[in-house]
């Protein structure tokens, strides 16, 4: 708890307020603890933050600036009662609400923590984070003073060097770290935030975790068994999250800043990464990591998970082997990419495959694979290479098949044209809730290409290019299933004709809240099965019996 007092530089009192949280802001925004006006005042201008060391002030105005005791700064602290924070026409004092017993504020905080219990009792996580922030600041000071060239060190050498320096930083703190703080744990927290992925390092190492979501530095969730779970881990500060993001994207030649506040990337193991930072992310840098599966799943694994039936797998394998064009449709996190990887196993080893992705995550087993990855623009706004450009280029690379990680825009037109021009057996994914919705979305994506095509021409293109739509669904219990396999059989009037071959029929929930249901054949036989039979190729038709 601390008090903020705002006055005019002329001396006129404006307002005083008590902050009951760790952080509070002053600015134009209605959400500010104290709201002030002025053309040179930002919505979020000044942030005050209290930790074990005291109260710190930070400029969050994105360019309007602030001063402390007449000197410009980005961040300053801990503040004393005499320090004056100023911006625009305003002066601010921050006053700690601790009871004054004649001792130093820092000293009181430390002694209260150390003397709380008899014997060793480990401090709560918030205290660790506060101390990690202090140690990290001291570490950065030592690195600046030493003018150390960290870029010249290998990873192991760098870790050993920083570990030693972190140990010295802990020892050099004015009052020393209290006994309730485990020094080894504190050292690991700071080291992970400096050279690794920080608080989420252990989460990513957990084999049961499939996704990690950092909403802000102290609000981190994971996905386990298809369900979201809040964790008790956190970063020491928003800057620590931002540093983690920069360490991920820098080796890939990508950037993130105020002019380009969003980025897609990948970890070394192939895990998919999305990051977004202020001013778009209001609570601080946000990081989402979809973990890369070390084990490449097979169709037998999907059957074991209850995601598909054996009959569906047989149909899908023949669909790929006999070069039908397939779109895997589904919502976010429904398992589209996983299914696409499984389907790619059935592409013959003798064929040349070209893959196109935003962030490379496909795992093809074929020996003759060319993997292409899109590239964002550089700091000057140049050098961008889009998915659409890559799809166009791969047509000149003599592919037998084209696999596009996800169609989400004008590249859909180029993908359809490729499917119609001798590249049968191509695969892609797209977002949609049903096969019929997938067709509507395809129409919209084609229109996004900028080509002024009649809607009927687009539908004719879709009906002749796409053969099968595989619908993937994620259920409330976290399970993922193929809920429909639908064949496109042509066009009737102005409507694309669909024939559902298999479907999943939900029958309710069991006592544990898991979805109950069964996979059923509709009795329809795919048109391409009939075509293959006419060519003298015998396929198992028993799987289509109801």
Image: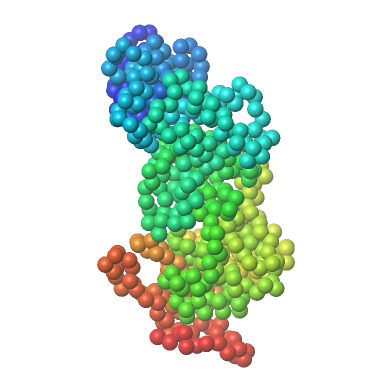
492 vs 158: above or below: below
Q: Quadrant of the C terminus?
A: bottom left
Q: Residue at x 40, y 27 (%)?
A: 178
Q: Residue 225 appears in which quarter of the rendering?
A: bottom left
480 vs 146: above or below: below
In depth, the one of 68 and 197 nearer the eye is 197
* Place of residue 291 in the rendered image (x, y in percent of width and height, measured from the top left): 51, 54
Q: Residue at x 69, y 67 (%)?
A: 367
In depth, the one of 438 and 110 nearer the eye is 110
Q: Residue at x 48, y 65 (%)?
A: 329
* Place of residue 266 in the rendered image (x, y in percent of width and height, measured from the top left): 57, 50
437 vs 205: above or below: below
The answer to whether residue 410 shows anywhere in this view is: no
The answer to whether residue 306 shows anywhere in this view is: yes
Asked if residue 24 lies left or right of residue 372, the reply is left
Q: Residue at x 29, y 30 (%)?
A: 117
402 vs 52: above or below: below
* Place of residue 271 in the rendered image (x, y in percent of width and height, measured from the top left): 54, 53
* Place of residue 385 in the rendered image (x, y in percent of width and height, measured from the top left): 65, 50
Asked if residue 156 lies left or right of residue 180, the reply is right
Q: Quadrant of the N terminus?
A: top left
Asked if residue 35 lies left or right of residue 451, the reply is left
In depth, the one of 431 and 155 nearer the eye is 155
Q: Residue 381 appears in which quarter of the rendering?
A: top right
In depth, the one of 313 and 411 nearer the eye is 313
């Amino acid at each position: 708890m601390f008090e903020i007092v705002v006055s005019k530089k002329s001396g006129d009192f404006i307002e005083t307020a008590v902050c009951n949280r760790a952080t509070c802001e002053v600015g134009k925004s209605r959400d500010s603890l104290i709201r002030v006006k002025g053309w040179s005042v930002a919505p979020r201008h000044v942030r005050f933050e209290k930790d074990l060391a005291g109260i710190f002030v930070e400029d969050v105005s994105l360019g309007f600036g602030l001063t402390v005791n007449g000197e410009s700064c980005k961040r300053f602290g801990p503040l004393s009662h005499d320090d004056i924070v100023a911006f625009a026409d305003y002066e601010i004092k921050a006053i700690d609400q601790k009871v004054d017993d004649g001792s130093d504020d820092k000293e009181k905080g430390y002694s209260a923590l150390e003397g709380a219990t008899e014997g060793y009792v480990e401090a709560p996580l918030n205290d660790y984070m506060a101390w990690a922030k202090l140690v990290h600041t001291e570490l950065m000071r030592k690195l600046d003073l030493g003018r150390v060239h960290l870029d010249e060190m290998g990873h192991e050498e760098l870790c050993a060097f920083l570990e030693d320096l972190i140990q010295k930083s802990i020892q050099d703190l004015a009052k020393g770290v209290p006994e309730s703080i485990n020094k080894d744990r504190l050292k690991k927290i700071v080291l992970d935030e400096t050279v690794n992925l920080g608080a989420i390092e252990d989460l990513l190492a957990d084999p049961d975790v499939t996704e990690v979501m950092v909403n802000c530095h102290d609000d981190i969730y994971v996905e386990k068994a298809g369900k979201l779970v809040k964790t008790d881990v956190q970063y020491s500060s928003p800057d620590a999250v931002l540093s983690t993001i920069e360490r991920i994207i820098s080796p890939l030649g990508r950037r993130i800043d105020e002019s380009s506040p969003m980025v897609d990337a990948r970890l070394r193991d192939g895990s998919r990464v999305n990051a977004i930072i202020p001013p778009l992310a209001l609570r601080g840098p946000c990081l989402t990591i979809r973990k890369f599966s070390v084990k490449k799943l097979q169709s037998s694994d999907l059957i074991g998970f209850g995601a598909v039936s054996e009959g569906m797998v047989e149909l899908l394998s023949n669909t790929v082997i006999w070069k039908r064009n397939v779109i895997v449709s589904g919502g976010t996190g429904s398992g589209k990419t996983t299914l696409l990887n499984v389907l790619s196993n059935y592409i013959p080893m003798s064929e040349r495959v070209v893959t196109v992705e935003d962030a490379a995550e496909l795992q093809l087993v074929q020996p003759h694979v060319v993997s292409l990855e899109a590239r964002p623009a550089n700091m000057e706004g140049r050098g961008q290479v889009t998915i659409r450009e890559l799809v166009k280029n791969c047509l000149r690379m003599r592919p037998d098949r084209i696999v596009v990680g996800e169609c989400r825009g004008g590249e859909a037109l180029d993908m359809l044209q490729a499917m119609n021009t001798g590249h049968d057996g191509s695969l892609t994914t797209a977002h949609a809730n049903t096969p019929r919705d997938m067709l509507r979305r395809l129409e919209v994506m084609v229109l996004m290409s900028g080509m002024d095509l009649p809607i009927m021409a687009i539908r004719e293109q879709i009906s002749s290019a796409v053969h099968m739509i595989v619908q993937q669904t994620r259920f409330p219990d976290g399970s993922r299933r193929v809920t429909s396999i639908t064949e496109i059989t042509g066009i009737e009037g102005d409507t694309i004709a669909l024939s559902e071959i298999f479907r999943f029929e939900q029958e309710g929930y069991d006592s544990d809240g898991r979805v109950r249901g069964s996979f059923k054949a509709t009795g329809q036989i795919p048109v391409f099965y009939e075509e293959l039979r006419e060519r003298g190729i015998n396929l198992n038709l028993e799987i289509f019996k109801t």
